[in-house]
Image: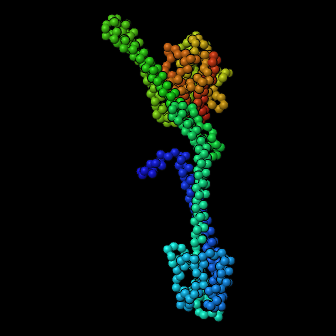
Amino acid sequence: MTKDAARSRGLSLRARLLALTLALLVAALLGSTGLVIDQLRGTLVRQLDERIHSVAMVTQRLPGLEDLVDDSQVRDTVEQRAIRDMYVARLSADGRIAQVVRPAEGAPPDLPRLDTAAVAERDGEPFSTPSTGSDGRWRAIALPNGPGQPAGSVVAAGSLSEVDSAMHRLTGQVLLIDVAVLGLLGVAGWFAVRAGLGPLRRIETTAAAIAAGDLSSRVPQLAAPGTELGSLATSLNTMLDRIEAGDAARADAEHSMRRFIADVSHELRTPLAGIKGFTQLYRIGGMPARSDVDAAMNRMEGEAERLVELVEELLLLARLDERGAAAVQTLLQRTPMDLRTLAADALRDLKALDPARSVVLTGPGGGSPGGAPVLGDEARLRQVMSNLVGNAIAHTPAGSPVRVGVGVQDGLAVLELRDEGPGMTAEQAAHVFDRFYRADTARGRTPTGGAGLGLSIVHSLVTAHGGRVDVHTAPDQGATFRILLPLHTETGACPRVVDL
């Protein structure tokens, strides 16, 4: 990298824009000035050509050499044409100077050979010629002698010194004006560029705030949406919204993961501690009787079952994450079935787990229960209903009533479970199917509560069946979990239905 390139990289955008603008202005002014001066010089030279042509014409008409020296007509024509330094001479046929009609004030022009043939070739066109002195140039014209005169020609030349002097003065004046204009434009351009880059400085300030950790900062709407700055502001704000949402989701995921790890650790530690305690007690001889050993083995078996259940839930969620809902559908062993079978099993489970509860079976939302034929994996859907029953038992007061509904509504098979527990807020309901989530404040965790995976498994398995699960709840008004699955209307083997 050159030093100039390194210095340019160190300049601010404002300085580079101003320098580029001034460079373009300089090029434009110099180009236009040069064009104007060239056009003006050409005009002055043409005017000089016209003047020396008039003098040459007057001299051409003079009667003879003896009248040339003191002829007043030439002097009058020169004065009328305002040519201060004029040279007029008559040439012989071979191009030699026969007589100087009007001598030059300084060094005369250095004329080329102008014999009769050369004059005829020039055909009266003006031409430039140097001075016999050290500097200066002349414009000259050669015309053949008029009729009745000896062979030869007349040469008239006018000095270009006045034209050159005028051009030099004009060039100096125009350059001074250009410098003044550039100075004024530079000052005005500095303030204009500074004002124009003001929105970019505000964007820079916002970016600095975001870099410092304030992801809530947004770029103000600096211009109309259709402009470059407006589009830039909109794009940046959209990007910031996504970054903030992604950061919030990442923070929530990390928080949920930490809470999940803590919960799973607790769930694993409790049965493991029990198993370890019984084994240590057996090792030190704390179980002398066979009945003590049997009781300890039963307790250890129960704790092992809790561990197996927890691990299976984790493995199921891991498979769902790895394969996705669409791929999981291929793993389901679907057969025609009726959701009334699951409703009957849920009814029996609720009565067995809490005989004091009032459990009723109705249709969706009330009324008489009805058939709900679907094509599903009965074992997985039974797991779904088992999780909902366990959720109701764990998070509602003992003895509170529960309603199980089954039937068809709006062209979908419906299986629902409603409890009369403490309910949930709208915010808690929005996250109730999130993995690792527990609405502890509204539906308090009981000693039998799990790690917050049951409802997530419910949602994943129902989605894998092409359905959905909804929750309708409010604080102190209980909760209704509703499973909606596509109806199975194909003819064939009748699904197994339990008598309700």
Q: Position of residue 238 (x, y in %)?
A: 58, 38
Front residue of 318/48: it is 48
Front residue of 367/19: it is 19
Q: Residue at x 63, y 39 (%)?
A: 221
User: Against 453, is 353 above or below?
Assistant: above
Front residue of 389/382: it is 389
Front residue of 218/116: it is 116
Q: Residue at x 65, y 24 (%)?
A: 364
Q: Position of residue 466 (x, y in %)?
A: 56, 33
- Observer able to see residue 291: yes
- Farthest residue to the front: give it: 70
- Farthest residue to the top: give it: 289
User: Against 138, is 6 above or below?
Assistant: above
Q: Position of residue 237 (x, y in %)?
A: 58, 38
Q: Residue at x 58, y 59 (%)?
A: 175
Number of numbered discs present?
0
Give residue 434's quadrant in the image: top right
Quadrant of the rendering where the C terminus is positioned: top right
User: Against 340, is 189 above or below?
Assistant: below
Q: Residue at x 57, y 77 (%)?
A: 105
Q: Position of residue 14 (x, y in %)?
A: 55, 46
- Observer able to see residue 368: no
Give residue 362's quadrant in the image: top right
**Which color scheme does this rendered protein use?**
rainbow
